[in-house]
């Protein structure tokens, strides 16, 4: 009887500890990775109008919900003796008003929240450099680095600050190995991709190595140090992640970012698993693995466990109370600063500032957008008031327009637009004054140069992506993107621009009146944009000389960029301030708030895509015609 009970007790223990015994016997290891990316300082749920502390609402995201979801999964996995790691694919900064706090004595809200939540590692994204490397260094120092590396590692495998720069002393790691509780050794690196490098606004003296070569070297060192598996936490985008997986197949798992892509199922590139969790903390990514050391096989278990890969961070998620309290402290800090920045017009970030029956939307590839029209009209409106001069054209790039402006849809918020939701679209960057937001600049171009700027917009968006496409106020144009590039040089793939993608362009002279923007004309056009775009446009001439642009004053003399900044009461006039002031200038509607005019519900054909025959067809047609004539002549000679 004693032997039977002993055997029964042993059997119960085996069942209770099944996972641990299976791992030690079968040499298999289970672990879970939770991941986010492109959080962009979204400390609270958005749209803010639809979030209610008591009723919940349809707003999504927020750090308190993120922490709540992670707490639940951690508890679940701890009961199964399964390790959990948490990573971010970068761009933790930039976008809504909370992203301004690093400019205020280096307040490091996002990083401190990540520490409390328990993130293992975060990769540096391009928007971490929005305020320059000096501010980034101050931000990390305020977050406790380099000592804070013991909590959350900052990864920069191909990021190289100079040895004498403060960033080099803050513990940014090339790579490292984390040994899990079950004995599995995970080698971890983090890359900034080529597209992200090209979109780094203020890198200063910081340089970036080739991502692929940096990954190869890091993987080799991690393998030599005994890593069982390799995880690359990338701010690169899905396209570059797939290339990396093909060129460095030793990487087992890629945690992605940069392109804001919600991958509801992983991408499998041979044996490499690629995931990404969208953006703005709409989702928490969850991927569960089993590693068989004997077979050197990595398996994904989500479907087996019936667990989704992306967990919506909506009102169904119980927020973490401690993180909620921390967020409220940062919110109070931000409210105080916003009141100063707006001259008391706004004292609370979720304060309603406008009403609308529709969404101001954007993001359409190479097309006019309603949010683009609204922001450029606001820029023109503010510039004319500040300069006292007529503005012909205002321009803004899609990449600087960070979000749609979404009015509330709940019972308590129907049609309301909060300051937070309005500024999400236009609050990017900073100026030399240390205040948030790119400043407006005012300069003159010839009509011919203005045409070149239109060509640059079409060319770069065609060759790169939609971020480079410009939205305009004060003109309309028709263009064919297929005419932007004549051909690509064989084997090298180098594009040959045509400078003939713009079919027509007209300046607005009245409500419904336009005149042609003439090619070759030296007549000056008054242009307003932001400092970042104005600094970028002339650089295109270095690559494509026939698209060169020179900023000028009203007399046509060359002018330095910093001398073009618009100032109001001695301070830089920011894009977000232009948008806020334009919004507050609208007529008061029935709900007692300025109402967004109905004209912005739809686009106005400021930019029309017109499909024509590609330019390469005409040389081919001429060639065929010449050949036909030669053949005809030869035949006639033979007959004679």
Image (cartoon, helix red, strand yellow):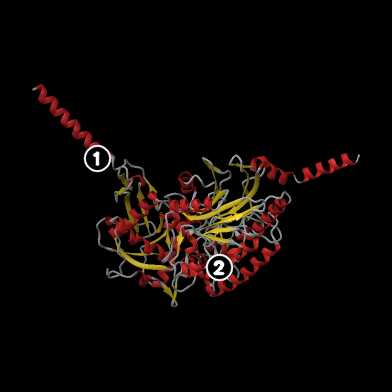
Mark 2 residue crowding within 10 angstroms, few (<14) / some (14–19) / many (20+): some
Q: Secondary structure at mark 2?
A: loop
Left or right relative to 449: residue 233: right
Label disc, if present, on residue 146 of the rendered structure: 2
**Quadrant location, the N terminus:** top right
The answer to whether residue 495 is above or below residue 142 is above
Residue for point 36% across, 47% down: 481
* One can see residue 460 in this view: yes
Quarter of the image where the C terminus is located: top left
Mark 2 to mark 1 CA distance (whole Å): 61 Å
At horizontal 29% and vertical 43% (from top left) the residue drawn is: 615
- Circle 1 sits on which residue? 619
Say whether disc 2 or disc 1 marks the residue closer to the N-terminus: 2
Q: Nearer the viewer, residue 463 or 57?
A: 463
Q: Return the residue nearer the eye: 264 or 354.
A: 264
Marks 2, 1: nearer the viewer? 2
Q: Residues within 10 Å of mark 1 (few under 14, many from 20)?
A: few
How many numbered tags mark residues here? 2
Badge 1 marks a residue whose secondary structure is: helix
Coordinates of residue 499 in the picture (x, y in percent): 29, 51
For image coordinates 28% across by 69% down, the residue present is: 558
Give how far across and how far down residue 8 sits, in percent: 84, 41
Residue 522 vertical position relative to residue 568 in the rendered view, above or below: above
Q: Position of residue 183 (x, y in %)?
A: 65, 51
Q: 454 or 386, which is in the foreground?
A: 454
């Amino acid at each position: 009887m004693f032997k039977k009970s002993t055997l029964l007790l042993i059997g119960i223990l085996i069942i209770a500890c099944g996972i641990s015994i299976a791992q030690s016997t079968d040499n298999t290891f289970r672990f879970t990775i939770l991941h986010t990316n492109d959080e962009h300082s979204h400390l609270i749920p958005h749209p803010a109008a639809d979030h209610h502390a008591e009723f919940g609402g349809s707003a999504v995201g927020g750090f308190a919900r993120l922490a709540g979801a992670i707490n639940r999964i951690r508890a679940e996995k701890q009961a199964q003796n399964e390790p959990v790691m948490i990573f971010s694919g970068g761009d933790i900064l930039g976008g809504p008003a909370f992203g301004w706090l690093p400019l205020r004595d280096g307040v490091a809200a996002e990083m401190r929240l990540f520490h409390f939540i328990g993130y293992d590692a975060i990769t540096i994204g391009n928007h971490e450099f929005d305020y320059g490397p000096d501010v980034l260094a101050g931000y990390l120092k305020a977050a406790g680095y380099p000592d804070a590396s013991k909590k959350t590692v900052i990864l920069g495998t191909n990021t190289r600050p100079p040895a004498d720069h403060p960033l080099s002393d803050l513990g940014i790691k090339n790579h490292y190995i984390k040994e899990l509780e079950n004995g599995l050794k995970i080698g971890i690196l983090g890359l900034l991709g080529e597209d992200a490098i090209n979109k780094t606004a203020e890198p200063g003296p910081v340089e970036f190595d080739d991502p692929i070569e940096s990954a190869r070297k890091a993987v080799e060192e991690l393998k030599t140090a005994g890593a069982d598996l390799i995880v690359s936490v990338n701010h690169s985008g899905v396209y570059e992640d797939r290339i990396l997986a093909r060129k460095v197949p030793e990487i087992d798992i890629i945690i992605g970012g940069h392109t804001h892509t919600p991958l509801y199922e992983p991408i499998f590139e041979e044996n490499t698993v690629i995931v990404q969790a969208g953006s703005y903390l709409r989702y928490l990514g969850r991927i569960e693995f089993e590693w068989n050391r004997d077979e050197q096989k990595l398996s994904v278990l989500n479907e087996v466990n019936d667990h989704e890969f992306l967990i919506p961070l909506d009102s169904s998620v119980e927020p973490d109370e401690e993180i909620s309290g921390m967020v409220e402290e940062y919110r109070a800090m931000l409210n105080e600063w916003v009141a100063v920045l707006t001259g008391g017009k706004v004292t609370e970030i979720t304060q309603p500032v406008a009403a609308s029956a529709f969404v101001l939307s954007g993001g359409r590839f190479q097309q006019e957008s309603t949010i683009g029209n609204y922001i450029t009209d606001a820029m023109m409106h503010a510039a004319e008031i500040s300069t006292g001069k007529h503005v012909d054209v205002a321009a803004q790039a899609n990449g600087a327009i960070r979000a749609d402006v979404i009015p509330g849809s709940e019972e308590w918020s129907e049609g309301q637009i909060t300051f937070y939701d309005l500024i999400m679209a236009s609050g990017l960057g900073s100026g030399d004054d240390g205040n948030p937001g790119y400043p407006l600049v005012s300069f003159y171009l010839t009509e011919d140069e203005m045409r070149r700027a239109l060509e640059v917009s079409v060319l770069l968006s065609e060759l790169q992506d939609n971020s480079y496409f410009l939205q305009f106020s004060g003109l309309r144009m028709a263009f064919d993107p297929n005419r932007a590039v004549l051909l690509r040089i064989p084997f090298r793939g180098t594009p040959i621009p045509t400078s003939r993608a713009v079919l027509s362009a007209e300046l607005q002279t009245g409500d419904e009146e336009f005149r042609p923007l003439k090619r070759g004309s030296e007549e000056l056009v008054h242009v307003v944009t932001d400092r970042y775009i104005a600094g970028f446009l002339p650089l295109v001439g270095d690559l494509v000389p026939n698209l060169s642009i020179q900023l000028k004053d009203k007399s046509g003399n060359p002018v330095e960029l910093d001398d073009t900044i618009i100032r109001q009461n001695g301070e830089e006039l920011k894009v977000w301030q232009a948008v806020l002031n334009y919004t507050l200038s609208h007529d008061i509607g029935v709900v007692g708030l300025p109402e967004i005019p109905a004209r912005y519900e739809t686009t106005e054909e400021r930019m029309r895509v017109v499909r024509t025959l590609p330019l390469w067809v005409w040389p081919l047609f001429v060639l065929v015609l010449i050949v036909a004539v030669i053949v005809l002549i030869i035949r006639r000679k033979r007959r004679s």
